[in-house]
Image (spheres, rainbow, N blue to C red):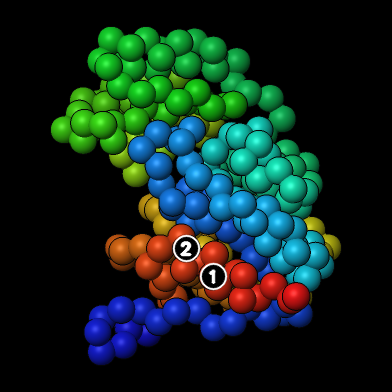
Amino acid sequence: MDDLTGKKPAPPALDPDGDALFLDFDGCLVEIAPRPDAVVIPENLPQVLAHLSEQLNGALAVVSGRSLHELERFLQGYDGLMVGSHGAEARGMTPPLEESPADLAELQAELAGFAQEQGLLYEEKSHGGALHFRSDPSRQDEVERFAETLAERFPAFAIQPAKMAVELRPDGFSKDGALALLTQLPQFAGRAPVYAGDDTTDEPALAWAEAHDGYGIKIGDGESAARYHLAEPRNLRDWLAAAVEV
Ligand SMILES: [Mg+2]
């Protein structure tokens, strides 16, 4: 519900006995960086996640478009559930995607070649790749057109728009699909899903949480299915820290 300022309210305190928590990574747990490898991880973040996971009886998952191995590197010290590659990869449950599509290497070579020719940043992912145009947002149209031709040539992959980037990822996976799988795990039984995310890729998952007796927290500006709002990742980190029992 919007208040008189048009802003949605901040979320209520987390209920460790009744809530399950799903957290996006970039732009949500950590600030967006100029390059994806330049994110700054607050020193105590893995420990906060580890403590929260314990308090929630394991009903906490990081759900990201990043490759799983990168998430693991960034969040050393947190050993709980993680979903990577927009729902295709997972730690702590059966990985939804067992094998990469056969033409992955060919697709990645096309993306890398285009990036090199055009002076764009290419980010290789476990099951796909992304072209970043944050350094020159005027390139968006041509990058999107190229991605569309690739999606036609490589039907096992789908386009994933993101903030200042276009990604090709395996078709058929999504963050809301990941939530549907995660909540089948025994530790999620009877808990209300709470999802926090900042991007268009999070909207289906925010809507999923709202539709399953939980709620969404949108980080940053923009229309959202979430009923709650926090301005910046540091506000989410404060909200998480407040829920950690000391
Ligand atoms: Mg994000």
**Helix, strand or loop at disc 2?**
helix
Residue furthest out toward the front:
43
Q: Mark 1 falls on what kind of element?
A: helix
- Does label 2 point to a residue whose CB lies under 8 Å from ligand 1? no
Q: Mark 2 highlights which residue? A: 234
Residue denoted by label 1: 238
Circles 2 and 1, Cβ within 8 Å, touching? The answer is yes
246 relative to 132, above or below = below
Q: Residue at x 26, y 81 (%)?
A: 6
Mark 1, residues whose alpha carbon is within 10 Å: few (<14), some, or many (≥20)?
few
Using the rendered image of the protein, determine whether residue 211 is visible from the camera's viewpoint. no
Depicted 91 relative to depicted 113: above or below: below
Q: Is residue 216 left or right of residue 224?
A: right
**Image coordinates for residue 227, horizontal then vertical, percent:** 43, 76
Q: Is residue 16 above or below residue 25?
A: below
Q: CA distance from mark 2 to mark 1?
A: 6 Å
Residue 124, given in percent of the width and then of the height, sits at: 50, 23
**What residue is rendered at 68% in x and 39% in y?**
72
Q: Nearer the viewer, residue 37 or 153?
A: 37
Tell me the residue at 71%/43% (across/down). Answer: 76
Percent across and percent down for residue 97 are 67, 34
> In this orientation, does residue 145 appear?
yes
The amino acid at mark 2 is: Arg
On the rendered structure, is 167 left or right of 212? left
User: Residue 50's image quarter?
Assistant: bottom right
Q: Is residue 206 above or below residue 173?
A: below
- Residue at image coords 37%, 84%: 1
Outermost bottom residue: 4
**Percent x, y for residue 103?**
54, 14
